[in-house]
Amino acid sequence: MIERAGLALVALSMTTAAALAQPLADCSQGRNAEIRMQACTQVIKGASFSVDEKAMAYRNRGNARADAGAGGQAVADLTEAIRLAPGNASAYAGRGRARLGLRDLDGAISDYSEALARSANSAPFHIGRGHARLVKGDADLAIADFTEAIRLNPKSASAFNRRGLAYRRKGDLARAIDDYTAAIVINPIYALAYNNRGYAHEFQGRKDAAIADFQVALFLDPSLVGAKDGLKRLGAPPDYMAESDRRVREGKALVEKNCGGCHAVGARGPSPNKKAPQFRNLHERHAMLALREPLSRGIAAPHDEMPKFTLTGAQIDTIVAYINSLTPARPSSGWKPSIVPIAEAEEIGDPRKGLSYAQKVCAQCHAVSGRQATSPNANAPTFRAVANTPGMSPTALAVFFRTPHSTMPNLVIEPEAMDDLIAYILTLKDKN
Ligand code: HEC
Ligand code: HEC
């Protein structure tokens, strides 16, 4: 009798545990942002969750809202996460990122400092604070942060690229070029580092070197309209420009049709929906960042008012190209490319880590290395073939990985591994 009651109790508590475990798991690992958001709200509202679990839920929901561009709500969620679990460094870093989007630079810097006070050896937190300091104009302090990030992670191409920008801000072009080059050596497909080095060469009057860099940048990423403009300025042959122009045209048509009801999509005028940011000002919200990552996150994020779009990676690339073409108004005379270019880098993947992850997780079906001619699973394309699919881009891969696939049913790629994988696969792109 006692035994039976015990068993029933165990069974009961197991179902309760399972019912509680699902939203917790979905709130941190749900397949898409929408599932994650709903699960986090469930945890926040539920009576049976612990304070730590609620803190985690506020943190994850806040980060998802920051992705959606809903900065105020994101800050509110992350503030609550901090109140519930003041020892958690990543909640501070998340709020720092959200405040950066709101142009609260001092708030962002102080949040990243709080994060570092709790986790001093985090390269990403140093990069975050360095970035906020650079946007604020404190180049020396920014350099100190990026240097520390490089000491902690000498393979961070992004830290080198950003320190390059900080040196450039100080007018030290030689050091800037060294840092961009270091970033390129670590990651040979880093389009933005080529682009930034192109500007530095151009400013030094080294026309051929500038053209060579802009061409590689545009080859790797035709949505980098800044590189295309550089080539035009320098009178280079129009090799890669056509693809870029095509994207701008198609992106314009796409946003006029789908986004103009809420966002100001052109060069003038307010947004019909006051809460929807003007596309021409997205550069300010993501100061000194390349727009590809924030845009693809923003479009995929669940919004209160924006409908859910299912755009392909190629379509998102055209939108990125179009919005990149909406460069902020330049002073009518005397504009020089010495003004820090818009394009800058997000933390991007490390191809070496991507390869080792792929060997562990993907190699049972796919030919993972560039030399293998056939895949173990005949239906699975080789990664080299994937990389050389026309129109293949980081966005296309990211969209593919975020969508569930019947042939790869249980494959959930961890967010951290995703960027590494994308970086690795794109190294397999043939040069011609
Ligand atoms: C029905 C209105 C509506 C439509 C249509 C719409 N949006 Fe939005 N969008 C919003 C609002 C409102 C926000 C602000 C964030 C929020 O409130 O969730 C937003 C935010 C965004 C953001 C995040 C901005 C940031 O700071 O990172 C991106 C990116 C975006 N929209 C892209 C698009 C694109 C691309 C389209 C067309 C394919 C589109 N939106 C169509 C209403 C809309
Ligand atoms: C159990 C076998 C299996 C595993 C494991 C697997 N895949 Fe696949 N994958 C396939 C098959 C089969 C296809 C082709 C059919 C399809 O597109 O759905 C495919 C298609 C793809 C494609 C799309 C190619 C295209 O051009 O449409 C990509 C990209 C991809 N896989 C990446 C990965 C990555 C990255 C991993 C590891 C993280 C992985 N796959 C693990 C079986 C697998």
Image (cartoon, rainbow, N blue to C red):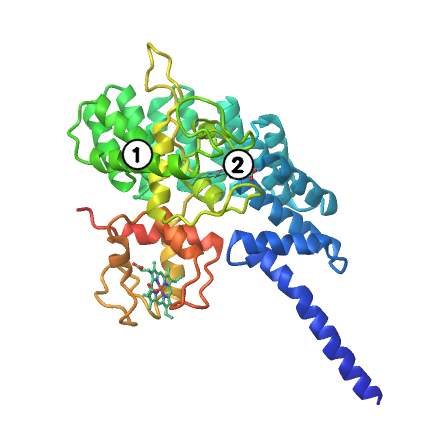
Residue at 38% x, 34% y is: 256
Which residue is the extreme one toward the top? 333
Q: Secondary structure at mark 2?
A: helix
Report the side of 336 relative to 169 (left or right).
left
Q: Amino acid at mark 1?
A: Val
Residue at 70% x, 43% y is: 82
Q: Please report whichever mark, 1 or 2, sits nearer to the chain's N-terminal start.
A: 2
Q: To which residue does mark 2 refer? A: 128
What is the quadrant of the N terminus in the image? Answer: bottom right
Q: Is residue 358 visible?
A: yes
Residue at 73% x, 57% y is: 46
**Between residues 83 and 1, which one lies in front from this camera angle?**
1
Q: Residues within 10 Å of mark 2 (few under 14, many from 20)?
A: many
Q: Position of residue 164 (x, y in %)?
A: 39, 30
User: Looking at the image, how many numbered discs can be counted on the residues?
Assistant: 2
Relative to 412, is 126 above or below? above
Residues under labels 1 and 2: Cα distance? 30 Å
Question: Based on the displayed image, in which of its 4 quarters is residue 29 positioned?
Answer: bottom right
Q: Amino acid at mark 2?
A: Gly
Q: Secondary structure at mark 1?
A: helix
**Between residues 354 and 49, which one lies in front from this camera angle?**
49
Q: Nearer the viewer, mark 1 or mark 2?
A: 1
Report the side of 176 relative to 44 (left or right).
left
Q: To which residue does mark 1 refer? A: 248
Q: Position of residue 171 (x, y in %)?
A: 39, 19
Q: Position of residue 137 (x, y in %)?
A: 50, 21
